[in-house]
């Protein structure tokens, strides 16, 4: 055997400076800085000017802390929407925004006051609001940089803030549209109230947690009844809110319920028949005697006295028994005590019977100082105050009214999601938007376009009806969101707009002190809007009242409302001052899409819906997309107290923003999903495979020039045409995923194509061609042509997902062609789609898998070193229209022969191995010698080197 030459230098290996190691945490900030220096967002707006628009309106996060993983997911999804629409050639601007008013910020400023032992009530309102404004601006600036670091592309230098004077003026203008059309009223109703924060709360500001409460049974003695046998007996009510007993004014019964008059322990009680045994057990007795039973409807006209009647006054008044359809026998006694100040059913039933609230509980949860029982005491949400040995139960026990009490009732109870403190229902004067009042489509506040739109949309009905129709007209992704928001709107009460706080947009109404009616004067309203536009919310103050009212009205005749608006009205009005104001001329109304978490069905989605339906007759969006919540790796809700939170800022420090993005776009965002160390490691592994795909493409395309090397598809080998067919299928699937907002599907399609169709199949088969064929060989040219096509397509497909890596890859190949994010998708030639060829290669790929499985045991046992040393015999029925040589190339084996067996068989080849391409061929004289192809290529190289010398 002769000594063989080392042919490694003659092989055409891929060449690229693109690093295998990403180093994203170090590399991404430089790319981000380059985008900012180049004004990428402005470049993109100029490049897409005049195109069809796609408007995603950003739901404003609160400006009060670092971003968390929920922020990251939410903004990455928004960025994916905008980038994919831009990729399709649309003008898709993105204006980020922040919600800057309300309790989250006010609460934080008050926390600082408490640390400094300052009393907020002693600070001038304008000074306090200025501190809230500064606090909000600080976190706007912080969150802006954190979101930019995620690669979110937007108009970061010109975001919208609800605390901008223009925004505040627009919110006031929207409120006054409600006022001018008669869609506001002031009334006293029980609303969710936070004694800690001293304000009414919206449904969206409340969360429910399991707690253990005191449950009590209280006896009310019957003193008047149509049936004289009932007099002297006791109606028993059961409640888990002992603090409402001092405000009791009636007792409700179910008209269709059967009640038993029982005697136990020397006392007679009236109890619903299904609940007798449980009641007797609860009061500690074992037996009871039954006197008779009575239908609930027969209790009409019965009156009882309050256990604390000896206090006189309010408590001496007899309490009527009232028929209530809401009374059930699910638990308790079958009777419900009525406190119209503190329950919706209570309020409605008592109002129907001319029983008014007494406003006994103050805003801080204490009873009024002049209240006959427990005056000045509380807070009513204090467990000790309600405990079996607390002041309420002790007084009831001493009066003989407490039948049973125990602190062991577990149930779900509403809490403020900010302070985490319990909330109560409290009747207070508030401003409301009616849900079931007729809306006049000819309202003076509507311009001609809005009037026409409302008529076309069938407006002129109630706000509830208009909103429900708008829900029907809106696309929901996922579809289940439609039923969720619809059920909420169907059952929601009137919208409580007022809050008793300082940091927010004021309810800019003047109320006539004599009539109680608010002033409706377009000239006054115009002055109010202009004043807020000039000076912000501080313009609404007593000093400015004379100028705002003008000469036609006397200041002393009007009360200036001091409540502020629910922050959901603020954010619900963002469509007006962002999409319609003209400050962002690239935006249009209505938005194509609103995108937020599923909790916003009762929050921003709904407040925006109601605001727009009341003022414009339709929703401000064409489609709504909702995502689930991010759980930890075990599927548990994240909590700082549990120590299971995942900080996206730290993940970026470890892995880079593109890994966070790839995670966010790989999960099924429509459901709750998970994140954790092992999950992120798996995502990083997927990323490395994608990065290596691009690195291979860059190296394999080194020096490629389409003009001198490109080949038309019609003249390409079948394998190349098959890959173009697969690319056409991928392109269609990705476009559909964009239309469906199916980003998990989009990312999975892209990853699978790179891993399975390219790396494990096409690249694997054609590496011999790339490394060893002559540069001028038509097959090699065809391969490189398809690689260029793949590169141009894949880099665009990947750009919305891996925004930093795609830019790095693009700049590595085209350093002078600007940003990849200015590129767009172009339709692929229709003739690339070849279903017959796809079906044919589908069968060949399945056969290739069988061959690979048959080879693996020989490789494992080191019978052969690689598949190139395998001689393969196919089973009977294998494709007969493909040459043995083409099959050997496809399977990467030495030879392939037809057979008559039932399975693939493999034996070691007896052919010698080429010293350059490592293929085993009959023409190779001995191991290490060259095959005919390699001889020709090496000879040409040697000749070229000789000529060069």
Image: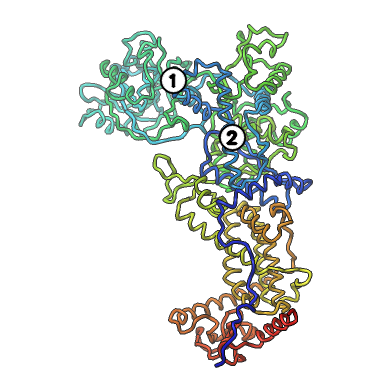
Look at the numbered discs 1 and 2 and tell me whether their residues touch, using CB distance below 8 Å: no
Q: In which image quadrant can residue 370 be found?
A: top left
Check the image and report above or below for 107 versus 486: above
Check the image and report above or below for 420 versus 800: above
Q: In which image quadrant can residue 145 be found?
A: top right
**Residue 894 at x, y = what percent?**
57, 85
Of residue 561 and residue 93, the one placed in the foreground of this image is: 93
- Within 10 Å of disc 1 (Cα), the crowding (few <14, some 14-19, many 20+) is few
Of residue 415 and residue 86, the one placed in the foreground of this image is: 86
Q: In the drawing, what numbered circle is on residue 22?
A: none
**Residue 342 at x, y = what percent?**
44, 22
Residues at marks 1 and 2, CA–CA distance in whole angstroms: 27 Å
Q: In which image quadrant can residue 146 be found?
A: top right
Of residue 469 and residue 666, the one placed in the foreground of this image is: 666
Can residue 193 be seen?
no
Tell me if 585 is positioned left or right of 575 in this view: right
Mark 2 falls on what kind of element? helix
Q: How many marks?
A: 2
Q: In the drawing, what numbered circle is on residue 140?
A: 2
- Of the numbered discs 1 and 2, the one sitting upstream in the chain is 1
Tell me the quarter of the image containing the C terminus.
bottom right
- Within 10 Å of disc 2 (Cα), the crowding (few <14, some 14-19, many 20+) is many
Mark 1 falls on what kind of element? loop
**Residue 104 at x, y = what percent?**
52, 30
Can residue 214 be seen?
yes
Of residue 769 and residue 402, the one placed in the foreground of this image is: 769
Residue beneath the point at 67% across and 7% down = 554
**Residue 914 at x, y = what percent?**
59, 86
Check the image and report above or below for 333 versus 350: below
Q: Which residue is mark 1?
A: 117
Tell me if 352 is positioned left or right of 177 in this view: left
């Amino acid at each position: 055997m002769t000594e063989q030459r080392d042919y490694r230098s003659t092989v055409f290996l891929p060449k690229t400076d693109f690093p295998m190691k990403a180093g994203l945490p170090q590399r991404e900030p430089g790319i981000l800085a380059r985008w900012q220096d180049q004004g990428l967002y402005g470049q993109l707006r100029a490049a897409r000017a005049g195109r069809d628009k796609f408007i995603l309106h950003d739901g404003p996060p609160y400006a009060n802390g670092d971003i968390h993983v929920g922020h990251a997911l939410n903004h990455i999804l928004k960025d994916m929407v905008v980038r994919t629409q831009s990729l399709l050639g649309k003008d898709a601007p993105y204006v980020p925004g922040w919600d800057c008013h309300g309790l989250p910020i006010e609460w934080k400023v008050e926390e600082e006051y408490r640390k400094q032992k300052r009393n907020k009530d002693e600070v001038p309102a304008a000074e306090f609001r200025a501190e809230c404004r500064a606090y909000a601006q600080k976190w706007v600036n912080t969150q802006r940089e954190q979101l930019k670091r995620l690669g979110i592309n937007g108009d970061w230098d010109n975001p919208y803030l609800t605390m901008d004077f223009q925004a505040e003026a627009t919110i006031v203008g929207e409120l006054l549209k409600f006022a001018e059309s008669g869609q506001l009223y002031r009334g006293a109703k029980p609303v969710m109230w936070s004694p800690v924060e001293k304000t009414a709360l919206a449904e969206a500001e409340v969360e429910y947690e399991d707690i253990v409460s005191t449950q009590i049974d209280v006896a009310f003695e019957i003193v008047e009844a149509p049936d004289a046998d009932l007099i002297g007996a006791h109606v028993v009510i059961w409640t888990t809110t002992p603090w409402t007993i001092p405000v009791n004014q009636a007792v409700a019964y179910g008209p269709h319920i059967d009640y038993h008059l029982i005697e136990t322990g020397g006392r007679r009680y009236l109890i619903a028949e299904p609940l007798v045994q449980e009641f007797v057990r609860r009061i500690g007795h074992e037996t009871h005697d039954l006197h008779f039973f009575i239908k609930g409807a027969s209790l009409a006209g019965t009156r009882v006295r309050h256990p604390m009647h000896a206090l006189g006054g309010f408590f001496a008044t007899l309490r009527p028994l009232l028929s209530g359809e809401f009374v059930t026998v699910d638990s308790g006694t079958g009777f419900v005590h009525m406190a119209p100040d503190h329950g919706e059913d209570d309020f409605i039933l008592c109002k129907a019977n001319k029983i008014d609230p007494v406003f006994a509980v103050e805003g801080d949860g204490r009873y009024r100082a002049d209240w006959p029982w427990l005056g000045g005491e509380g807070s009513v949400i204090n467990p000790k105050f309600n405990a079996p040995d607390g002041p309420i139960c002790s007084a009831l026990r001493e009066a003989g009214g407490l039948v049973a009490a125990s602190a062991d009732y577990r149930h779900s109870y509403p809490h403020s999601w900010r302070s985490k403190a319990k909330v109560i229902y409290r009747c207070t004067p508030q401003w409301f938007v009616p849900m079931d009042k007729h809306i006049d489509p000819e309202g003076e506040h509507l311009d001609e376009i809005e009037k026409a739109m409302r008529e076309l949309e069938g407006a002129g009905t109630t706000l509830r009806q208009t909103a429900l129709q708008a829900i029907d007209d809106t696309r929901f992704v996922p579809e289940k969101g439609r039923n969720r928001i619809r059920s909420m709107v169907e059952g929601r009460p009137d919208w409580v707009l007022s809050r008793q706080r300082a940091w927010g947009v004021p309810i800019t109404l003047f109320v006539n002190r004599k009539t109680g009616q608010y002033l409706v004067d377009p000239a006054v309203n115009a002055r109010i809007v202009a004043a807020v536009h000039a000076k912000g919310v501080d313009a609404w103050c007593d000093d400015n009242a004379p100028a705002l009212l003008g000469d036609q009205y006397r200041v002393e005749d009007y009360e200036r409302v001091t409540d502020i608006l629910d922050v959901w009205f603020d954010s619900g009005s963002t469509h007006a001052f962002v999409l319609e104001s003209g400050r962002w001329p690239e935006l249009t109304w209505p938005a194509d899409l609103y995108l937020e978490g599923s909790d916003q069905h009762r929050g921003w989605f709904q407040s925006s819906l109601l605001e727009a339906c009341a003022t414009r007759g339709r929703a401000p969006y064409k489609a709504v997309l909702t995502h689930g919540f991010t759980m930890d790796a075990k599927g548990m809700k994240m909590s700082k107290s549990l120590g299971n939170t995942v900080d996206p800022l730290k993940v970026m420090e470890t892995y880079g923003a593109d890994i966070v993005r790839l995670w966010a776009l790989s999960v099924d965002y429509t459901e709750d999903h998970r994140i954790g160390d092992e999950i992120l490691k798996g995502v990083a592994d997927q990323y490395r495979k994608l990065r290596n795909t691009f690195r291979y493409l860059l190296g394999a395309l080194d020096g490629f020039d389409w003009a001198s090397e490109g080949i038309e598809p019609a003249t390409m080998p079948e394998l190349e045409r098959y890959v173009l067919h697969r690319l056409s299928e991928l392109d269609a699937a990705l476009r559909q995923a964009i239309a469906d907002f199916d980003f998990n599907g989009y990312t999975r399609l892209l990853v699978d194509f790179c891993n399975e169709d390219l790396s494990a199949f096409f690249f694997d088969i054609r590496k011999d061609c790339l490394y060893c064929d002559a540069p001028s060989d038509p097959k090699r040219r065809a391969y490189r042509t398809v690689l260029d096509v793949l590169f141009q397509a894949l880099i665009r497909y990947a750009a919305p997902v891996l925004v930093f890596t795609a830019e790095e890859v693009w700049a590595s190949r085209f350093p002078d062609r600007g940003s990849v994010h200015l590129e767009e998708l172009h339709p692929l030639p229709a003739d690339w789609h070849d279903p017959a060829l796809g079906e044919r290669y589908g069968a060949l790929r399945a056969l290739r898998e069988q061959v690979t499985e048959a080879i693996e045991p020989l490789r494992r046992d080191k019978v052969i070193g690689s598949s190139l040393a395998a001689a393969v015999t196919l089973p009977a029925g294998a494709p007969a229209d493909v040459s043995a040589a083409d099959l050997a190339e496809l399977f990467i084996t030495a030879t392939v022969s037809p057979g008559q067996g039932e399975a693939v068989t493999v034996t070691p080849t007896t052919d010698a191995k080429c010293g350059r391409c490592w293929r085993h061929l009959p023409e190779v004289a001995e191991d290490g010698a060259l095959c005919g192809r390699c001889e020709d290529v090496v000879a040409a190289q040697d000749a070229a080197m000789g000529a060069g010398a």
